[in-house]
Image: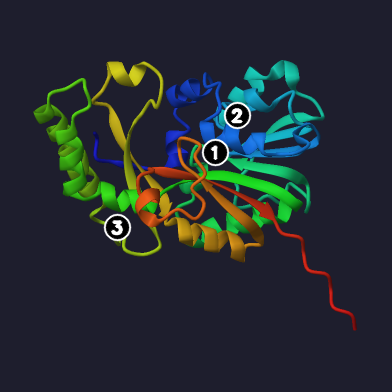
Amino acid sequence: MTGVIETSQALFMRDEVVAEYATFDFLLEPERVILRRLDELSAMRVLDLGVGGGRTTSQLLGRVGRYVGVDMSPLMVQACRERFADRLGSDVRFAVCDARDLSAFADDSFDLVLFTFNGIDSVVRDDDRRRVLHEVRRVCAPGATFAFSSDNLLFARRRMRFGPALRAGLAGDGGRSRLATTRHAVAGTWRLRRANAPLRGLDGPYARYVVERPVFELSPQHVERPGERICVDGYCVEPDEQRRQLLTSGFERVELFGVDGSDVTGAPAERLARFSWLYYACRAGTPAAPRAG
């Protein structure tokens, strides 16, 4: 690991990272579960925030009424335009856009808004995060669904402790000796603690959080170059705090899903702490009718 903290915006401007993301073609299990629950998906107007290289695009085209994919990275947007060149038209388009400012879209423009792969966590300032939620609510039609994933602060706190790392190492993973697995787990915890040392800590309901990750997430390149890892700056939040933020932003009926697609709405903190990230699905509330007089 280089030890240099990199922003998500800088990471997703790397040519090699864009090239990798442009190969993704799958849905995560929580996404499958959420989409299956939606009625009239074929008529929906969809906004795909942080579209990346089009991972979700390939799974939604032909299944929805209108699709708009946006990303802060011009390179990602260009990759999508090239990848789906034969599908571009009035009902399918891509644009460079910052989720903090969706002024390119009118109020009540969409029936489904997605922000996948923890893209919302690249917005590290709390006031900016709330601005994203406000903007998403504005462009959502009443009753529209907003679904997104976010790093779980309950898990992050656990990951920063040596006790869980030791227990995980001693349990083994089937491919290494217990000693090697324990060393790997403890070293990972030590690197996380070192990377997060300059920050204010993880004691509040939300925090700026540095995660260690490979430059390449899923492709064989990161297996071939296992030492090439980086630290990426992001936002991390407790599930209860995320729910509160959504409710105060005008959303309702907040549901939580684990990485395995299980519905963990209302689950105790001990269970939620097992998931490194969580999926949230909520509905845009109907504005209250104006009072007479």
Would you identify the image quadrant in which residue 203 lies? bottom left
Q: Nearer the viewer, residue 19 or 169?
A: 169
Q: Residue at x 78, y 47 (%)?
A: 109
Q: Which residue is mark 1?
A: 116
Question: In the rendered structure, which disc, 2 or 3, sits on the residue that comes first in sequence?
Answer: 2
Q: Viewed as shown, does residue 262 lie left or right of 141? A: left
Q: Which residue is mark 3?
A: 199
Q: Residue at x 22, y 49 (%)?
A: 193
Q: Viewed as shown, does residue 87 lie left or right of 270? A: right
Q: Are marks 2 and 1 in contact (CB under 8 Å)?
A: yes
Q: Viewed as shown, does residue 110 lie left or right of 203? A: right
Q: What amino acid type should be assigned to the residue bearing mark 3?
A: Leu
Q: Is residue 195 visible?
A: no
Query: Horizontal and vertical percent for residue 192?
Result: 24, 45
Q: Nearer the viewer, mark 2 or mark 3?
A: 2
Q: Which residue is mark 2?
A: 56
Q: Nearer the viewer, mark 3 or mark 1?
A: 1
Q: Is residue 186 above or below residue 290?
A: above
Q: CA–CA distance between discs 2 and 3? A: 33 Å
Q: CA–CA distance between discs 2 and 1? A: 8 Å
Q: Quadrant of the N terminus?
A: top left
Work out which residue is located at the far right of the displayed protein and give it: 293
| Secondary structure at numbered mark 1 | loop
Q: What amino acid type should be assigned to the residue bearing mark 2?
A: Thr
Q: What amino acid type should be assigned to the residue bearing mark 1?
A: Thr
Q: Residue at x 52, y 30 (%)?
A: 28
Query: Horizontal and vertical percent for residue 276?
Result: 38, 43
